[in-house]
Image (cartoon, rainbow, N blue to C red):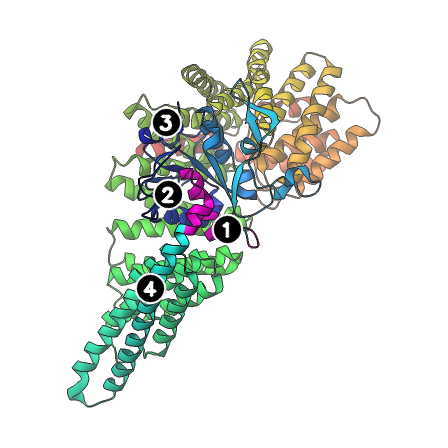
Amino acid sequence: MTQASVMPACRYRAFISYSHQDKTWAGWLHKALETYAIPKQLVGQTTTAGAIPRRLAPIFRDRDELASATDLGRKVNEALAQSANLIVICSPRSATSHWVNEEVLAFKRLGRSERIFCLIVDGEPGASELPGRETDECFAPALRYRLGADAALSRERTEPIAADARAGKDGKTNAKLKLIAGLLDLDLDALKRRELKRRYRRMAALATLALAVMAVTTTLAIAALIARHAAVLASHTAERRQKQAEGLVDFMLGDLNDKLAQVARLDIMEAVDDRAMGYFQSLPTTDVNDETLAQRAKALEKIGSVRLDQGHLPAAMASYQAAARLAATLAQSEPADTARQLAYARILAFIGMTYWNQGQLDAAQQGFESARTVLQRAEQHATNDLTLQYELAMVDNDIGHVLEAHGRLDEAVVPYRSTLALSRKLVAAKPDNTDWASQLGGAHNNLGKLALMRGDLATAVAEYTADDTIETALSARDPHNNDQRDNVLTVRAILGRTRALTGDIEAGMRDMQQAVDIAMQLTKVDPNNTGFQEHLALYASQSSRLRRLSGDLSAAQALNAQSLSILPALTKQDPANIGWQREFAEAQLEQAAQSQVSGQTDAACRQAQAALAILAPLLARQPDDRATLLATASAKLLLAAVSDEAQLPQQLRNEALNTMQAVKSGHDDPRLLALQVDALLALDRKAEAQPLIRQLWNSGYRDAALLAVLRRERIDYPVNTVFRQKLLAAADTHARE
C-alpha cells in the first residue's frame, strides 16, 4: 500500500511523541504545525504523501506521557494507528523515556518506519557510542535500531530522519520547515522559496501594521496621561482614551502576536511585548479603576507566558512579577471575589513554575506555597467552587513534587494528603468522571508508598486497599478495558506484598496469585504487549518469593521459571530499560535464594553474582531509587551467605550496611531495617541490631525472611497484638469511608 493511499484514511496528520520534561517544546511544535498555513501555490498538488492540504491539522499530542500507566494504553495505540506520521522530540530525556521508546516501537510495528521524523532539541546523536558521553544520547533505542522479522529491535543500526532545532544547527524555523517538508514529501528548498516569498509579502504588511499600532498606542497613551491631569470635566474623556490605548495593547498582545508567531518573527513579537511592558510600567497603579488593573495584569501574564514558551525565563519572571503586583492589589481589595483570588494564585503558581524551570527549588516552593495561601483564603468564601478545588489540588501536588525533589519524603506527605482530600471532593461532585476517580486512586497509592517508607504499615495497607477498591470498581464498570484490568492487577500485587510484610502471608499469596492470573489472561489477549508481559514476569517472581518463604519450594520454582522465561527477552529487546534490567536481576536473585534452600551453594553463588552485576551499575546511576537499593543490598547479603571466600562475606555485609545507612530519606522503611538487622546479626553486632529489631516489632513488620533470621539467632519476636488491632481499625475506618 502506498503512502498516498494511507494518508486519506488517517485521522491525524502526525503523532508527537515526547518526554514530559520536554513539554514546552511539544507545545511549541504542536501549535507551530497546526497553525502553519501551507503556501497557496502548493495546496492541491499531489505527492507520495497524498494531496497537499491547506493545513496540517489535526496533530495528536499526548500531554500526560502516561505517568501512571504501565503500557501505551488503548487511546494512544488507537491514535498511533490513526496517524500518518510520527514525530519524536529527541533529547536525553526522551532517549531514556520508556513511553517514547514504546511509541516508536508501536509505530514501527504498524509498518510505518519510513514515516518517522525526529526533532533534535538537546543532546547529541550517537553519543551512546562515545565513552563518557552516554547520557548525552538524544535518540531512543527504538530510533537507533531497525525492527527485526520478529517485531523486536535488531542490532542493525538505522539513521533517523532528523531536523535539528539546536542553536548553531538548523534552528527552530528551519527545523520546523524540514519537518513540514518531510510530512508532505516536498522538496525543502521549494518549500523555503515559497515560504520566503509569502513571508516578505506578509511581513511588509505586518511590519507596517505593527509600527502603526505602536504609534497610535503611544499617542493615545500620552493623550490619556495628559488628560488624566486635566480638569475634572475632562476625566471621562481621559478614561475613554485610556481604554482605547489598552484595547490596542490587547490587540498587540493577542491577534498581532499570533500572526507574528505564524510567520516566525520572534524579533517583532519581542519588540511588541517590550513596548507593551514599557507602556504598562509607565502607567500609574493608582487613580485607575479595577477593570483597568485586571486588564493590565492579564496582559502582563500573557506576556510572561509568551516569554516562558520562548525559553526567556528571566523576562518571563519579570512579566509575571509585574502581573502579580497588580493582581495582589485586586485580590486584597476584594477577598470574597473568587475570580480575583484565582487569577492571583494562578500568577503566583506561574512564578513558582518559572523558578522550577530554572532549577531554583526553594524559590519554586515559595511560589507554590504563596499560591496555596491565596487559594486557602479564597476557599473560605467559595467552599464549593470546583475550579478552586482543582487549582488547590494541583498546587498541593506541585509542592509535594518539590519536597520529593529535595528528598524530604516525610514532609511531602502533607501536601499529598491535601491532594487526596481535594480529589475526594471532586469525585464526590462528579462520580462518573473516571479520570478523577483514577487520580484519586493514584493519590491513595502514593500515600501508601510514603507510609511504607516511614514504617507505618497499617496506613500503607489501608491506602493500598483504597486504591484497590477504586480500581476494581472502575474495572467492573468497564470490564472490557484491559488497561483498567492492568491497573487492578498492579495494585492487587502491591497490596499483597504489603500484607505479607505484616505477617499475613496467606492473604499476600492470594492477592499475588490473583495478579499473576490476570496478567496471564492479558498476555493471552495481547501477546505482544510488553507491559502485560513485564507484569506477568514481575509478579510471578514476587509471588515465587512468598511461596518459597511459606515452604512451597516447587511452586516457587515454577513461578520464578515463568518469570525468567520472559525477562531476558524483554531486556534484550530494550537494553536501556532500567526497570526491566532491575526486575531481571530480582528474578535471578530469587533463583539464587531457591538454590540456597535446595543446598546448591555453588549455583546460588553464581546466580547472586549475576544479579549483582546488573544491579551495581543501576544503583550507581540511580542511588536514590528504593527498589534498586533494596535489591542490591539483598544480593550482597545473599552472596555473603553462600560465598566460601575468607574475607568477602564481611566485606559484602559492611558494604550493604554502609549503602543502606547512607539513604537521604525513608530511614524507617521496615524493608531497609530488616536487611540491616540481617547484616548486623551476621557480623555478630547483636547490640546494634536490637534497637532496629524493637523498631520493626513496633511497626508490626513480620516478613517471613526476617522471622527466619530471628529464629536462627534465637531472638524472641512475638506477635504485636497492638499493631494487629491498629491494622483492623485502619481497615474498618476505610470500609466506613
Q: Which numbered mark, 3 or 1, is in the foreground of this view?
A: 3
Q: Mark number for residue 206?
A: 4
Mark 1 vs mark 4: which is more N-terminal? 4
Lateral position of residue 722 relative to residue 601, left or right = left
How far separated are the C-alphas under marks 3 and 1?
Answer: 30 Å
Q: Which amino acid does label 1 sit on?
A: Leu
Residues shaded magenta: 167-193
Lateral position of residue 539 relative to residue 592, left or right = left
Mark 3 vs mark 1: which is more N-terminal? 1
Q: Which amino acid does label 2 sit on?
A: Leu
Crowding at mark 2 (Cα within 10 Å: few <14, some 14-19, many 20+): many
**Residue highlighted by disc 1:** 403
Of 159 and 289, the residue lying toward us: 159
Mark 1 vs mark 2: which is more N-terminal? 1
How far separated are the C-alphas under marks 1 and 4?
Answer: 47 Å
How far separated are the C-alphas under marks 2 and 3?
Answer: 20 Å
Of 277 and 516, the residue lying toward us: 277
Q: Mark number for residue 484?
A: 3
How far separated are the C-alphas under marks 3 and 4?
Answer: 51 Å
Indicate the quadrant containing the C terminus: top left, top right, bottom left or bottom right: top left
